[in-house]
Amino acid sequence: MSRIHLLTVTRFAAVLAIALPVLGLLGFGGAPAAAAEQSAPNIAVTLTSDAEALAAGERITYTAEIVNRGEAVQARVVLTPPTYVALGSLDGADVDGNEATWSLTLGAAETKTIEIPARIGDIPEAELRATALLSLYVGDGTSPLVRTASADLIDGVDDVQTEVSPLPGILLAVGIGLVVVLIALAVVFIVLQRRRRAAEEAAKRDAWVGYARRESHPTDAEVETPESG
């Protein structure tokens, strides 16, 4: 393989190495990933309580809502309230201490709602919020697919929550967009440079061929005619 061909292959490989990830980010060639994403579980959960502010001795009801946006799936829903919250009588749940687990079969596009009665015990003085966790596991998985919480106010405790600014998320999205644009521009620049260099090399080859032809077949003006004596 000539040096010119080797350089061309090397540059083409470099362009592909940069262009393929960019095309993937832009959505080209993503059919296998899209199919895998469609088959993955898509479940949302929410947990709320009917109390405005909790106080010792009060009875409340937690409401868990499980929304399956995908195909049918086997799931486990685990409610973990604070240690001072005692759960009431629960149908279909496996209760261990103050933690309850439900084994559910979620049909495609099905929504299930679970109501959980509970009673508030003595709340520790240092407690700012009564936070109950709801976790959803798929199949025999040990890591939750999704998790949510109900962070209830406690009567007599002034807990002012700081509003989270969406600015960091916006900046992250803008940064990712800029990176994609810069990579795309780099790909275009490399392709243009490759074409320009290829054109220059072709012009040099043509010039060399023309020079060689002139040397091997000189014109009449270039041929010296010897003078007669």
Image (cartoon, grey):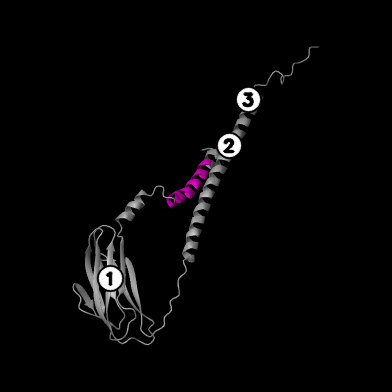
Query: For the point 38% across and 49% down, which residue is it?
Result: 30
Callout 3 amino acid: Arg
Measure how far apart labels 3 and 2 are at the Cα level: 21 Å
Asked if residue 19 is among those painted magenta in the image, a careful observer would answer yes
Q: Earlier in the sequence, mark 3 or mark 1?
A: 1
Q: Is residue 108 above or below residue 81?
A: above
Q: Is residue 141 visible?
A: no
Q: Where is residue 146 in the image (x, y as percent from the top left)?
A: 33, 66
Query: For the point 48% across and 58% down, which residue is it?
Result: 176
Q: Residue furthest left?
A: 91
Tag 3: Cα neighbours inside 10 Å, few (<14), some, or many (≥20)?
few
Please give the label number shown on residue 213: 3
Give the SS element for disc 1. Answer: strand
Please give the label number shown on residue 176: none
Q: Which residue lies furthest to the right in this view?
A: 229
For the C terminus, the image quarter is: top right
Please give the label number shown on residue 64: 1
What's drawn in magenta, residue-wise?
8-25
Q: Can residue 150 be seen in this view?
A: yes
Main secondary-structure element of the magenta-colored stretch = helix
Callout 1 amino acid: Ala
